Image (spheres, rainbow, N blue to C red):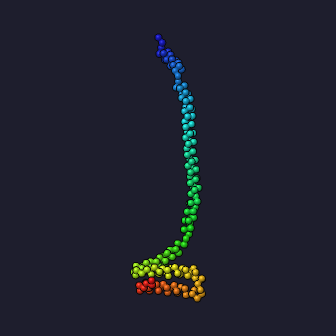
Amino acid sequence: MASDEEKTAVNETNNEAAEAAKPSAEAAEPSAEAAKPEADAAVSKVDLKLSAAVNRVLAAVSAAVTTVTSLLSPLTSLASKCAGQIASLPWACMAVCAVTNGSQLLAAAAWFNLTANQLAFVLPVFSVVLPALLVRFGAALPESVRGFSGDIVMVGEKAVGLMILSNTVLI
């Protein structure tokens, strides 16, 4: 009978022969790796198609944005120009003019409500319109009337006020 050492040596030799005879895991891996490039090639084709589609969509969106921007550019420049013009107006002068003329109109409305005389609406003509016309066209008036034009307007305004208070109707 063989000793234990001989049995162990025979077992090791048999194990090595069995390992050499059986296919190793390393031999199976190259076949998996060989299939992997084919799968990568299929995935890369899909990735290329997807990226091409994404690029086409991005190009279309970019073209649409460019078109809309070019169409809206004149409108936005016009709007900003109008806003600049409005911002540069003399707002203080306009406010004073509106308050002054508005108070004249308010006084005429008050006189009408108090007296129910339609002649009250002539008061703003004497207090707002005629002085503005005299400033604009005063040089066209004859020399003899030009000095008295402001006084004539004031007398007309007082006469209308007196007629309103006395309820005199001319018509």
Q: Residue furthest bottom?
A: 144
Q: With respect to residue 87, does 159 lie above or below?
A: below
For the point 55% across and 31% down, the residue is: 36
Give the total number of marks visible in the rendering.
0
Outermost top residue: 1
The residue positioned 58% from the left and 84% from the top of the image is 141
Q: Is residue 144 visible?
A: yes
Q: Nearer the viewer, residue 169 or 53?
A: 169
Query: In x, y percent, where is residue 70?
Result: 59, 55
Q: Is residue 165 visible?
A: no
Q: At 45% from the left edge and 84% from the top edge, which residue is drawn?
A: 170
The image shows residue 40 at horizontal and vertical percentages of 55, 34
The residue drawn where x is 56% and y is 69% is 88
Q: Quadrant of the C terminus?
A: bottom left
Question: Which image quadrant is residue 148 in?
Answer: bottom right
Q: Nearer the viewer, residue 101 or 62?
A: 101
- The x, y position of residue 11, in whole percent, is 49, 17
Please say if 62 is above or below 8.
Answer: below
Nearer to me, 106 or 86: 106
Front residue (pair 116, 77): 116
Q: Position of residue 7 (x, y in %)?
A: 48, 15
Q: For residue 121, which quarter of the picture?
A: bottom left
